[in-house]
């Protein structure tokens, strides 16, 4: 059992002031794997006080000291590679290959890239008759979801450390153990007492408390739009800066000249990776009407080729959803798609026949989808793809942008000018052209209701800083 009923406050694990606990389950076995404390307001106040006390000295550490600290964290994180992969696989139900190649690797890259970005980062700059100073924002509150337990925590922690901002983290209650491992990793790497604090507990007590706390200066949140809205409203009471990384309904625009098999593979990876529980996943494949038959044949084959099953097996590529609630939500969307008149090309409701235990769903592809259908407009957070046809490029872009979201976009094809035209005209924060590789220096964040602010690299560091202009001192 992974039970740990303590919170990490002022450099040590201390007991909760409350007695309630939260059970954590392995979504592949439905078994309890451990318990955490359901923290109280008093626990949160202690953590905020520790972070506040750490602020004067930590905010004055030099850039070089913080680069060293981030590099030490990356090394210690690397030392804990196998344990991190195990814990992610168990609490998220993520296939071991994805736990390693996506989850573990993304966390490592955030620490490494923040250290690199810091090397070229300027905290002071003369501009004409004024000087710009960038100063740590104060105490940061970090609230993270369950779908990427080391990615979202690490990018926020790395940004805060790079900027000299002490922090309080509340990880998701369904995936707290990887975050708790990070507390030990940071302590071993030499993060000073009080700089990193972790309080477990419900969103309604600890998350809500963070967003309202008068001594927290900035909240960085990743999760649902509904909670993002609450955080913004709460933050408004003390005019707190907030960064929100919320949902998405990202388009994959397939050009006429694209290789349909390659395009289908991109679509399949997007919808199957992390069992579709990815805010930036391409969930709408927007394809030329003239290529409908070829794309549908290829996408059916590409999605079917994903092995799903036991996350501990190396050949498994897709695991279960995180919880029964998430399973029910995804089922209801599949039912809605059928009811709305979309055609089921693959999958459907119910569990895969051979996987009765675990929150497994059938990978599902809908064709003949129109963009006004609920399945094309709402975030499903499961392996459900909507295929929508277009007749010309203007229509493709109109469909791509006809959404409340704007987190990511994808375009596949050959003609460079057309690729650039589509990339430039999708209203979203991160666009991938063909098989463009993830760059951890590139800013990540959304337009429209996908959020406010950016994470990763130097843009991520900026979020944890205030900007001061000084007149009369510049040389
Ligand atoms: N953008 C993204 O990456 C994500 C988007 N989602 C979307 O949200 C849907 C629901 O997922 P869900 O887990 O419920 O996401 P939530 O937004 O509820 O949870 C995200 C984080 O916020 C916390 N939280 C919950 N309520 C509050 C509150 N009132 N104030 C402050 N923090 C709070 C949660 O705590 P606790 O864990 O204790 O509930 C968790 O740490 C998904 O189906 C998906 O569509 C979900 C996860 C990530
Ligand atoms: C393989 C790259 C996956 C990028 C996922 C980024 C984060 C998504 C999320 O927070 O849901």
Image (cartoon, rainbow, N blue to C red):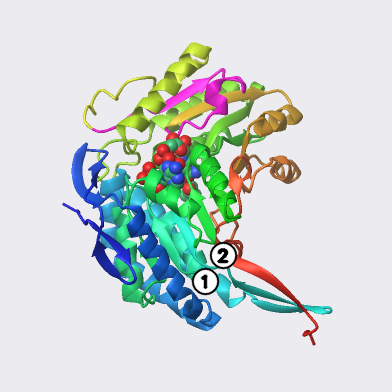
- Which image quarter has ligand 1? top left
Q: Are marks 2 and 1 in contact (CB under 8 Å)?
A: yes
Residue nearer the viewer, 185 or 257:
185
Residue numbers of the magenta segment: 358-382
Residue nearer the viewer, 187 or 116:
187
Q: Quadrant of residue 70?
A: bottom left
Magenta stretch encompasses residue 18: no
Of the numbered discs 2 and 1, the one sitting upstream in the chain is 1
Where residue 64 sits: x, y (%)? Answer: 52, 82
Residue receiving disc 2? 464
Quote the CA–CA distance across marks 2 and 1. Answer: 9 Å
Residue 162 is marked as: 1
Residue neighbourhood size for the residue with mark 1, other residues' Cα within 10 Å, grouped as few (<14), some (14–19), many (≥20): many
Q: Which quarter of the rendered picture does the C terminus lie within?
A: bottom right
Where residue 187 sits: x, y (%)? Answer: 33, 73
Label 1 element class: helix
């Amino acid at each position: 059992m992974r039970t740990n009923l303590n919170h990490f406050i002022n450099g040590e694990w201390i007991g909760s002031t409350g007695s309630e606990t939260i059970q954590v389950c392995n979504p592949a076995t439905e078994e309890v794997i451990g318990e955490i404390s359901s923290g109280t307001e008093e626990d949160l106040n202690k953590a905020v006080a520790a972070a506040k006390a750490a602020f004067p000295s930590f905010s004055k550490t030099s850039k070089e000291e913080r680069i060293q600290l981030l590099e030490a964290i990356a090394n210690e994180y690397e030392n804990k590679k196998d344990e991190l992969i195990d814990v992610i696989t168990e609490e998220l139900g993520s296939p071991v290959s994805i736990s390693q190649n996506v989850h573990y690797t993304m966390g490592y890259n955030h620490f490494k890239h923040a250290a690199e970005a810091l090397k070229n980062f300027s905290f002071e700059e003369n501009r004409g008759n004024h000087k710009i100073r960038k100063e740590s924002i104060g105490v940061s509150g970090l609230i993270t979801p369950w779908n990427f337990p080391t990615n979202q925590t690490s990018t926020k922690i790395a940004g805060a450390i790079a900027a000299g901002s002490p922090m309080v983290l509340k990880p998701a209650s369904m995936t707290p153990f990887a975050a708790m491992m990070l507390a030990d990793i940071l302590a071993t790497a030499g993060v000073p007492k009080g700089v990193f604090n972790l309080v477990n507990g419900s969103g309604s007590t600890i998350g809500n408390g963070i967003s309202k706390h008068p001594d927290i200066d900035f909240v960085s949140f990743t999760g649902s739009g509904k909670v993002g809205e609450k955080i913004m409203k709460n933050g408004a009471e003390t005019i707190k800066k907030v960064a929100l990384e919320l949902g998405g309904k990202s388009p994959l625009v397939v050009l006429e000249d694209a290789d349909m098999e390659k395009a289908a593979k991109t679509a399949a990876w997007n919808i199957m990776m992390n069992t579709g529980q990815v805010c930036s996943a391409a969930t709408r494949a927007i394809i030329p009407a003239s290529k409908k038959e070829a794309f549908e044949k290829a996408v059916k084959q590409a999605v079917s080729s994903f092995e799903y099953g036991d996350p501990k097996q190396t050949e498994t590529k897709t695991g279960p959803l995180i919880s029964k609630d998430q399973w029910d939500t995804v089922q209801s969307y599949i039912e809605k798609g059928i009811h709305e008149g979309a055609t089921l090309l693959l999958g459907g409701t119910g569990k895969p026949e051979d996987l009765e235990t675990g929150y497994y769903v059938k990978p599902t592809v809908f064709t003949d989808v129109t963009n006004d259908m609920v399945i094309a407009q709402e975030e499903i957070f499961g392996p459900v793809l909507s295929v929508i046809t277009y007749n010309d490029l203007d229509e493709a872009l109109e469909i791509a942008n006809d959404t409340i979201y704007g987190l990511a976009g994808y375009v596949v094809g050959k003609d460079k000018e057309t690729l650039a035209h589509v990339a430039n005209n999708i209203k979203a924060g991160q666009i991938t052209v063909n098989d463009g590789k993830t760059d951890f220096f590139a800013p990540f964040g959304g337009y429209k209701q996908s959020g406010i602010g950016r994470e990763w690299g130097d843009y991520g560091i900026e979020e944890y800083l205030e900007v001061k202009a000084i007149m009369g001192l510049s040389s």
